[in-house]
Amino acid sequence: MKDPIIQLTGLTKSYGKVIAVDKLDLQIYPGEIFGLLGPNGAGKTTSILMMLGLTEPTAGTAYVCGHNATRNPIAVKRKVGYLPDNVGFYPEMTALENLCFIAELNGLTKSYAQACAKDMLHVVGLEQEMHKKTGAFSRGMKQRLGLAEVLIKTPEVAILDEPTLGIDPKGVDEFLELIKRLSKEHNLTVLLSSHHLHQVQRVCDRVGIFVGGKLLVEGSIEHLAHNLQQQEGVTTAITLEAPGDMARFEEALKTLPGFRKLTVTGYSIELQTDADVTAAAVRLLVNSGANVVAVSRNDYKLDDIYNTYFENSITTKTAHEKSNGFFKRYQ
Amino acid sequence: MKNPTVSSKDINSHPAAAMQVLVSKEIAAHIRSWRFNILILLIVLTFGASLYVSSMGLKDAVSNMRDPDQSFLYLKLLTTTDNSIPPFHVFLNFLAPLLGIALGFDAINAEYNNGTLTRLMAQPIYRDNLLFAKFLAPLIVVGTLFIALVLLMIGGGLLGTGVRIEPQELLRILGFTLISVLYVAFWLSLAILLSIRFRQPATSALTAIGIWLFFTVFFPILVNLAIRPFLPNPNYISEQEYLAYNELILNLLRLSPSQLYTDATTTLLMPSVRSLGPIAMEQMVGAIPSPLSFRESFLMVWPQVSGLTAAMMICFAWSYYIFMRREIRS
C-alpha cells in the first residue's frame, strides 16, 4: 500500500481535565475520501485543527504531506486546503476579491490569481455571483465559495469540516457530487468531517467513527455493516396466517445453519442467525405446513451503524447540536 | 477544471509577499470603509478650520516683535489662534486617539466573529503577519493623511505668502507629524490589544474610549485630588519645595500619553519653549529670549517621544503575546 498522506499517531488534546481527543491513530492514503463521523463535540474539529498546526497537541504527532504539522505548519498549510465549519468571508468584498486575496496569500501573482479565481468560481458554479459582495451570500453559496478557496491553492489534501451543514438537501447532493468529482479528477485526498452519516456514505471511500475523542472503528461502510452483522447476527421476522404447530416449527428452524435465537410472539416468529437464511427458513416453514404471510429481513444499514456507535452520545448530545442536526438526521 | 498551467513567474513564494498582500488588503478595506472616511472628513475639517483661523491672525502674529517665534511663519500657521477654536495640535490631541481607536477596535475580534480568522490562519502565513498587518496598514494610511495635510499647508502657505520656509521649520513640522503618527500608533496598539482581549467589538470600542476619556478628562482631576491633601500651603514652604511639588505633579501627569503628546508637540512647534517644567528666575538670568535650534528642541522632547514609543511597544507586545497563544477556533 502507498504511504499515508495523513498520519496521526497518538494524537491527544486535553483542555484542563477535559480530553477532547484521546490518542488518535489514523492513516489516510492519497486519493481517498475519508469521512470522519461523529456527533458534535466528539473532537473532530480539534483533530482537524491539530492536523493544520492551528492547535498544539498535548501529546502525539500529526504528519501531513510528510511534514510535522506542529513543528512546520506553514509547509503543511501550503499543501492543505481547509474549509472551516462556519466559514466566513469579508462581507464588504466581492466573491472574486475574497478569492483573489486568498490566492495571493498563497503566493500567486495578482494577474494569475485573478484568472485562477474566475476559473474556480466557474467550477463551483458561482460565476453569476462573481461581483456580488459576500455579505449578501447564502449559506450554500458561502460553502461553494469556501470550496473554491480550498481548490485555488491546488492542494494535495482538502479538509472539509462539516461541509454540508446548513445546506438544503438538493444543495447537499450537488455539493457532495462536486467534491467527489474533483477528488477523482485531481487525485485529491479529501478528509470530510460530518455528523450526518447518510450524506457522507455516498461519497466516502472509508469512514472513521469518532465518539468522545476516540476513534471507535474505521473502514468502508460495507465493511462496518458486515462487522456489525457478524456481531449482532441477522434478524428475520416471519408472520404466519394462524398459529399452527409452533413447537414443530421451532424445532425445524433450530436446525438452520448459524442459528442463534428464536422468539415467538403471537403469530410472528423472530429468528436470529449468523448469516442470512431467510429463504431457507421460509422453505422450511412452508414444508412444515405453515402459512407464511409476511417476511421481513433486517439488514444492517446505516441507521444501525449510527445507533450502535453513537448511541450513548446521541442521547446526551442531541439537545445542543450545532445547528439543528437533530432534525436533519430525520430528513 | 480549466486550471491554467502554473509557470514559475506566477508563483511568488517570497515570505514578504504574504505580508504585502495582507497590508494592501487592510489598507483597501480601511479606505473603502465609511468609518475611516468620516474620520478623515473630521480631521480635514478641523485642520481647515484651525488653519483658517490662524491665517486670519497671521499678520498680527508675525509682526509681533516681542514674540521670539515671530519669524517662523509656517509654525505660526499651525499654532496661532484667536482663541475661538484651539490650534490644530491641540485638536489632534483629542482626535488622534479617536482615530487610533476607530481603526483598531475591531481588528481581530471582527475577523473572529466573521469566521474569517480560521480561514486566514489556514493559509501559509505566520500568525504574527496578521497582527503586523493590522498595525501597519492603519499607520500607513494615517501617516499618508497627516503628511499630505502638512504638505498641503506648506504649499498653500508658500503660494499665499511667498515667504520662504526655513529648513528648521520643515524639520519641526515633519517631527510634529511623526510624533502625531506615533501618538495614533499608541492608541491603535491599545485598541488592537482590546480587540484581541474582548470578543465583542462594541466592548473593546467602549473600553478603549473609556481609557481615552479617563486620560483626557479624569486623570488630571485625579492627580489633583490625590496630591492636594499632601500639598502644604504654598505660602509656608520654600521655593525649592514648591518647585519640587510642581515637578512631582507634572511627572504624574506625564503618565498620561496625551500629556506626553502635548509636551512634545508644543516644544516642537514653538521654538521658544525652553523648559517643560517650572524654571527658577535664577535659571532664566542671562537667557536671551530667542528660539531654540531644532536639535535642542528635539533633545528636550526625547523623553516624551521615548515614553510614547515605550507605551506603544508594551501594548503591542502584550497583544502579540496573547494573540500567539490564542485558540483560533470559535
Image (tube, rainbow, N blue to C red):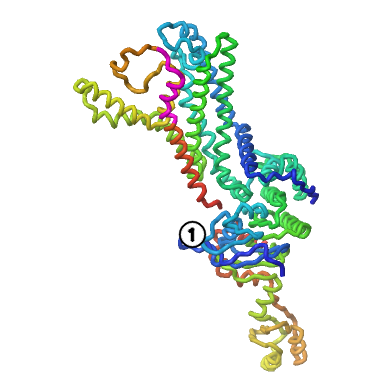
Q: Residue at x 77, y 91 (%)?
A: A287
Asked whether residue B103 is in view, the answer is: yes
A264 relative to B10, above or below:
below
Vertical placement of residue B80 versus B222, above or below: above
Q: Is residue A173 left or right of residue B277?
A: right
Q: Is residue B308 left or right of residue B28?
A: left
- Residue under pointer 1: A15
- Residue A211 shows in the view: no
* Amino acid at the residue labelled 1: Tyr
Q: Closest to the observer: B39 or A251?
A: B39
Q: List x then y, in percent, for residue A1.
A: 72, 70
**Badge 1 sits on which subunit?**
A
Lateral position of residue A289 relative to residue A194, left or right: right
Counting from the top left corner in percent of width and height, residue A117 is at: 74, 45
Q: Give residue A261's position: percent from left, percent from top.
A: 64, 86
x and y, in percent, of residue B130 in the image: 57, 43
